[in-house]
Image (cartoon, grey):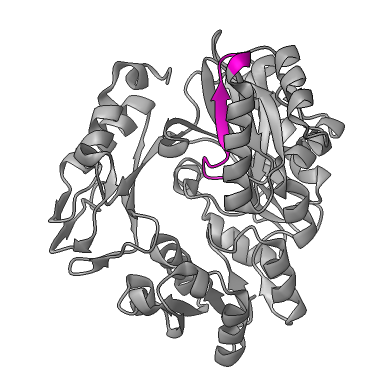
Amino acid sequence: MIQSLLIANRGEIACRIIRTAREMGIRTVAVYSDADAKALHVREADEAVHIGPSPARESYLIGEKIIAAAKATGAEAIHPGYGFLSENAEFAQAVTDAGLVWVGPKPSSITAMGLKDAAKRLMAEAGVPVTPGYMGENQEPAFLAERAAEIGYPVLIKAVAGGGGKGMRKVDAAADFIDALASCQREAAASFGNDHVLIEKYILTPRHIEVQVFGDTHGNVVHLFERDCSLQRRHQKVIEEAPAPGMDEATRADLCAAAVRAAKAVDYVGVGTIEFIADASEGLRADRIWFMEMNTRLQVEHPVTEEITGVDLVEWQLRVASGERLPLTQDELSINGWAMEARLYAEDPAKGFLPSIGTLELFQLPEHIGRVDTGVYEGAEVSPFYDPMIAKVISWGEDREEARELLSEMLEDSAIWPVKTNSAFLINALDHPDFVAGTV
């Protein structure tokens, strides 16, 4: 078993990883930038190393500094969390080359799933259904316009190297295609250094369904059922839940089997998520659910899976990275109850969701009635340098309605001041008739 672990991240996910590592008796090392000198993850780790100025590009995104910190502190392994370098195959390889344990999938698996077009071709070969569309090499605007016409409007143009909602354009009519393509390619080139795009049929009644998968170094792959992350704002997930409302057992079996095939196709080791898009115009049907992409890391929303399965996914990550077999077989995994998660952001909905920064003079969340994953504390500074998510609020219930009501209650009982949050927005979303009905 790994004895010492460096967490190459910050905020709530760093604290989340530290918590499990501590329970397993693993020594933890945090890294931090100037802005995070007094951050919670720095306080909670056994040791902390300063790695640079506040901007992430000068600290958390500099792999050499992180590897040097691991070497200097005697850490055996590096856990990347999510974001930053978590899906960077070159960094994963550099960690391994430095004689350290990478708590994540093989670099080859990250590469295979890194570009959306190549990943879709690979999935089609593995018998995983993919969204109707074009994912070829020819990027001539006139040629792409012809393919869009064949697919049928509306279509979605997506950067093949994209993520986080960037490099995406919905196009409703042929007359708008060329301008939308140029705009998408400019954003893709600026954000990802790659202006190649693919074109998909735009689903008018979409649901975002994803399946948690886990593989070990002994050839075993299991799924831990599905999550529904359909409630989004500007392509960013807002509320997630597990299982997916309206998912019957036959559809679940087909979908999860496809996800396991996807993981096996890239010889996957560790935790990963297969994201699907569903055309829910006639409910959730296996023949209307298609592969979108794979996230080769721990997801922000992993707690809802933990809550319904009783599995600590970070513990599994550390055990698998240490060479152990998966702790449970597929037959030993089951769904118990319902879980929901809301992402609490330091932002002001009244001002167009502008980030809200400053000192958290009051920060109280009702951890006694549910789960709260956070990277801040009362008196902490909310910085402008990073993602504005300050906490994940997670509820569990015997059924969906119990989980929904408890999550709403937890948000109502939260007290945060003077930093603004999206709490009221989340409560309104939870109470929306379409969400209550499970049709969002």
Residue 9, placed above or below residue 223 = below
Of residues 333 and 97, the one nearer the viewer is 97
Q: Can residue 236 be seen in this view?
A: yes
Judging depth in this view, the residue of 58 and 144 nearest the camera is 144
46 vs 9, nearest the viewer: 9
The quadrant of the image that shows the C terminus is: top left
Q: Magenta includes 167?
A: yes
Q: Which residue is drawn at 39% across and 64% down?
A: 11
Vertical order, 100 against 181 (above or below): below
Residue 153, image x and y in percent? 63, 13
Magenta highlight range:
163-175
| 254 to the left or right of 83 | right
- For residue 60, say whether it is visible: no
Q: Residue furthest top?
A: 282
User: Does residue 419 lie above or below 73 as drawn?
Assistant: above
Q: Which residue lies furthest to the bottom in this view?
A: 72
Question: Residue 269, position in %: x, y?
Answer: 73, 56
Q: Compare residues 122 and 355 and report the one nearer the observer.
A: 355
Image quarter of the N terminus: bottom right
Q: Where is residue 425 in the image (x, y as percent from the top left)?
A: 25, 35
Determine the image quadrant of residue 398.
top left
Classify residue 26 as left or right of residue 54.
right
Residue, x 37% and y 64% (percent of image)? Answer: 385
Q: Quadrant of residue 3?
A: bottom right
Residue at (47, 40) in percent of width and height: 308
Residue with the most extreme right position: 125
**Residue 268, percent from left and from top:** 76, 52
- Asked if the magenta segment contains residue 326, the reply would be no
Examine the rendered structure and indicate whether residue 158 appears above or below residue 315.
Answer: above
The picture quadrant where one finds residue 281 is top right
